[in-house]
Amino acid sequence: MSTFGDAKFNQPSEPAAAEARRGRWADVLLPPDFFPDQQVDATTWAEAVFEPVALIGAVVCFVLGIVALGLAMSPAWQTRFVVLLSAVVGVEAFVYARRLGRSAFLFKEWMVLLVPPIFLMRFLPYLDDPTASLGRDLADWWHDPGTFFTFAFITDLVVLLIVWSIVFICTRCLNQLRVQEGEVLDQTDARFKELYEDNWRSYDHSEPLKRLGQFYLWGGVILVILAALASIGTAQLLDLAALSQLVGFQRPSLHLALANVLLYFVLGLLLIGEAHFVRQRTIWRLDHLPVPGEVVNRWVVSVVGLVALAGIIALILPTSYAMTLGQLVSYVAEAVLEAFAYVAAGFFYLMYLISRLFPHGGGGSQQSAPAALPPRLPPTAAPPPGASPLDTIRSLIFWLVALGILLYCLSVLWRKRGPWADHLPIARILRVPLTVLLWLARLVGRVGREVGRAVLEAVPALFRKIPATTPRAFQFVSLSRLGPRELIEYFYLSVCERAGQLGHPRPPGVTPLEYQSMLRESLPLVDPEIEALTAAFVEARYGPHPTTRSRAQGVRQTWQALKLKLRRTRLTRPRGMVK
Amino acid sequence: MFSILPAALVLFVLASLFKISFIYNVSYVLFGVYVLAALWSRRSLTDLRCRRRYQERALLGDVVTVTLEVQNRGWLPVPWVQFHDRLPLALISPPFYRTLVSLQPRETRTFSYELHCRQRGWYQIGPLTAQLGDVFGLNDRHQDFSAGAQLTVYPKILPIDELGLPSKSPFGHLRTRQLLYEDPSRVIGVREYQSGDSLRNVNWKVTASSGRLQVKKLEPAMTLETVVLLNLNTTEYNRSYVYSASEMAIVVAASIANHLASLRQEVGLLTNGIDPADPHVGALAGYLPRKGRAQLASILELLGRVTVVAEQPFLPALRAEVKRLPWGATLVVVTPRETEELLETALPLRRAGFNVVLIYVDYPNPEPFEAAHQRAAMLGMRAHRVWREEDVDVWRRQVQSAV
C-alpha cells in the first residue's frame, strides 16, 4: 500500500471492497499507528474526522484575527481569498504531516505543496476584480519583476506560511501521541519488559501533548491581543492618551463578543481533551490494557461537560466593575464599622432600658439625674458616586474573583517552585504581614474577651441590690459647695475616717453615740470636741429642724480642733502600730 | 503536563488593560477548566475506596484468588482510573495486575486474579496504586491503597511416619519399643496375669466375664518434647548450595514439626534466621515446645517467613538459649554440616540430659557424612543426612532399622 510521504501503516485486513475503499481513506486521514493490533473502529474514525476539523478550524479562527487586525490597520487590504486559501493550506499541511513518518524538513516537498495555493492567492483576485487587468500586470511584471511582490501579496504569503507551519507542527504532535515505530517490542523483549521494567517507556508521549497545549494556549493569547487591537482601533492605538489609558488600566469598558476567539478556545479545549485521550490510549495499549468502551464515552461527555460548565461559570461571573479596589475596600470597611456600631448602639440601648427597669436603691442624686438618651447612631456609609448597590455587589464579586485568581496562581507557582526559590527568604517576607495580622487578631480577641467579661460582670449587677455603702477613699471635696447639713455630715465622717486610719474604725451597725463612747475609751484626747461634733451630726442628720450655716461654722471650729489632735496623734504614732 | 494558568493570567491582565469584557470571559473559561478539572480529579481520588480480599496463609501449591473491590463513593463519575497492584514475581508473572475502568457515581466493581504459591515465603501483596487524572491532562494523581498486606506460603511438608526420637522424660504419649516405661492411660488390650504383675493393672470386668485373671496390656510410652533448632547462617553453608540446602533445612524442620504435632507431641522451633515480621538480631527466634494445631500453625508460619542470614552465628545463640529449653527434651539440630564447635556445643547438652539429634543438610556426597555419623555415634548422638527430598525417606528407614 502506497502512502503519502514516507509513513508506515498497518493495513486492516478486511477483504471487502468497501473496506478497501475505507482503507484508502484511512491512508489519508488516520495517523500512522505502530500498534500491531490496531483496529479501525468508530473511535479512530471519529478521531480521524475530528482532529483535522478542530485543528484547521482553530487555525482559521486565528487567521480571522490576523485579517481583522490587518483590516483595522489597512482597510484596503484585499482579504477575500485569504481565509479560504488558509483553510486549503491547512488541509494540505494536515494530510501531508499526517502520513509523514519523519520530522525532517524537505524543501522540495514543501515547495510542491505550497506553490499552487500561493499562485492562487496571487491570481484569484483577477477573477472578481473588474478594475484589475491581468495583461497589464503581466507586462509590468515582465519589465519590473519586483512589482509582482506587492506588500499585500507578501502579507498573504506570510499568513499562508504561518498556517502551514502551525498545522504541520500540531499534526506532528498529534502523530507523536500514537504508538511510534519500535515501541512495540517482539515477544522476547516484551516478556523482559513485563517482568522487570513494567514502567519502562522508550518514548515520552507527554511531550507532544505539552507542546500542543502550549501552542494552543499562547496562540490563543496572541489571537486575543490581535482581536483586542483590532477592536480598539489602530487610530486610538497610536494616540498617546489612549496608550496612557491602556497602561493605566483606565480604558472605558468595551462590550463585544468575538466569535472567532470563542470558537478558537472551544475547539482548542476539545482538541486538547481528545489529544489527551489518544495519549492515554497509547500508554494503555503499550501496557496491554484493554480500553473499555465506557471510558471513551465518558471521556467525551466529560470533556464537553467540563467545557460547558466552565463556559456557564464564565458567563455568570462579572466582567466589569464600577468601583476600584481601593474604593471597594474603604466602602466595605465603612460598612463593617457601621454594622458594628449599630450592634453596639443597640446593645447599649438595651442595657439602658434594662437599667431603667431596676432603679438603684440609694443615691437620690442619681435618681434626680436626667434620663440618658440612646446613643447616637453613626452616619451611614455612602457608596461612591454613580454606583448602585447592584454595581457594588458586582464589583465586590469581580474583585473577589480577581484576587482569588491572583492568589491561586501565586499558590500554584509557589507549590511548583524550583529549588532556587528555597534560598529566597520569601517565606520570611510573607510571614511579616501574617504576623501583623495575627497580632491584630489576637489584640482584637483580647479586647473582645475583656469587654465581654466586663459586660458579663455588669449585667448581673443591674439585677442585684446595691450593697451597703462602704467608706469611700479620700477624694477632694469642695466645702464651699456643700450645704450646712452636708457640711456637718462631712465633718463628722472625716473625723470617723481619720480615727479609722489611726486604728479605731467605726464598726458597722454602731450608732454615733456608741462610737463616741468607744473613741473616748480608746482615744481620750478626742474629748471634749467629739461630744459636740457627734451631737451636731445627730441633730443635722436625724433632727427635725433645718441646719443653719452659722451652726455649721460653729461645728467647723470644733472639727478643726479635733482634726489637729488626730493629726498630731498620727505623727507621733509608734512604729509597728496597726494601721 | 502543561499548565494553562500562565496563559489564563496573561489573558486576565490583557482584559484589564483593554477593558474588553469578552476577554475576561475567555480567561474565566480557562480558569474554570483548570479549577474544575483539579477539583474533580482530587475529589475522585478522595472518594475512591479499594479493598483487597484473599486468604493470608496458603500451603505450597495452593492457588490463592485475590479479589479487588473498587468503589466510587462520590457523586461524580470517574472517567478513567487505572489500578496497578504490585505482586511478587515468585507468585505471578508478570509481577503485577493492571486494569483500567471507568466508574459511575456510587458504583462498585470487583476484579480478581490468582496467585500460584510455588515457593514458600512471606510475600508483600501490593500496594495497590490507583492512578487517575482529568480529561485534559492538567492533573495526574495517584494514591496507594491496601499497603502492608502479606501472604505467607508455608514450606513444603514431607510425610514422615516415624521419627524415632526418644526422650528421657518418663511419662508421655508416644509409643516406643523400649519397654522401660508404660503409660497407664494407653490401654492396648488384656493378657493373662503373670507373676509379678501389679494388682493395680488387673482388669476386673474382663476377669469377671472370662473367669480368669486378666491384666491390662499397656502401651510403652515416652514424652517427646522436641525442639527443632534450625541453623540458617549462610556462612556455614557451602556457597554453591546455600539456597537449596537452606531450603531443604526449612523443609526438614517443617516436616518434623508437622509429624510431631500430628502425634500430639509438644514441639517447638528456634532458629537464627531473620523473621521479617519481627526482625531481631542476636537471639534465636521461635517458639518453645507446646502442643496443638495452633503451635504447628505458628511454627509453619515462622518457617514460611524466615529468611537466611549472613552474620548471625548459630551456636553462640544456641548456648545462650539453653536455659530456656525444657530438661530432657529432644533437640533436633538441623544444620548444614558437622563442625568442631557444633560437637563441642552438643556434647555438654547431651551430658546435661538432652537428647541431641543432628541432621545435616549440606552433604552432597555420603562419604564425608559417614565420618561425621561415626563421630556423632561415638559421642552418643545420632546424625542423619538429608540432601534431597528422597533422603527424608531414607533417613526414616535408617531410623526404623536402627530402632
Image (cartoon, rainbow, N blue to C red):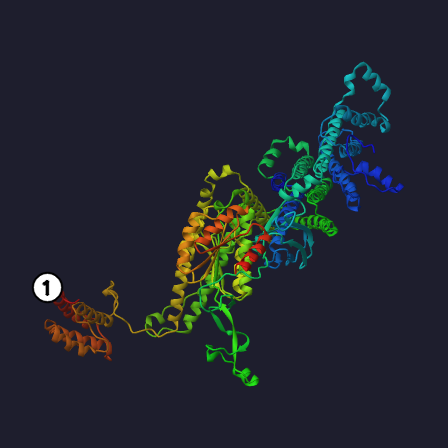
Chain ID at mark 1: A
Residue A461: x and y in percent read 37, 70
Relative to B69, does residue B242 appear above or below in the rendering?
above
Which residue is denoted by mark 1 in the rendering? A572
Residue A215 appears in view: yes
Count of all numbered marks drawn on residues in the image: 1
Q: Nearer the viewer, residue B288 or A523?
A: B288
Q: Nearer the viewer, residue A425 or A574?
A: A425
Tell me the quarter of the image containing the N terminus of chain A.
top right
In-image side of B6 versus A157 (left or right): left
Label 1 crowd (10 A; few <14 / some 14-19 / many >=20): few
Image quarter for residue B353?
bottom left
Amino acid type at mark 1: Thr
Question: Considering only vertical position in the picture, is B119 above or below A554?
Answer: above
Q: Residue furthest top?
A: A143
Position of residue A508 measured from the top left corner of the image (x, y, whole percent): 23, 76
Residue at image location 83% in from the left, 19% down from the top = A137
Front residue of this view, candidates B373 and B16? B373
Residue A565 position (above or below residue B388) = below
B216, above or below B166, in the image: below
**Coordinates of residue B158 in the picture (x, y in percent):** 59, 57
Residue at disc 1, secondary structure: loop
Q: Residue furthest front?
A: B195
**In x, y percent, where is residue B372?**
48, 49
A164 to the left or right of B129: right
In the rendered view of the protein, which quadrant contains the C terminus of chain A?
bottom left
Q: Say if residue A439 shows up in the picture.
A: no
Q: Is residue B293 left or right of residue A566?
A: right
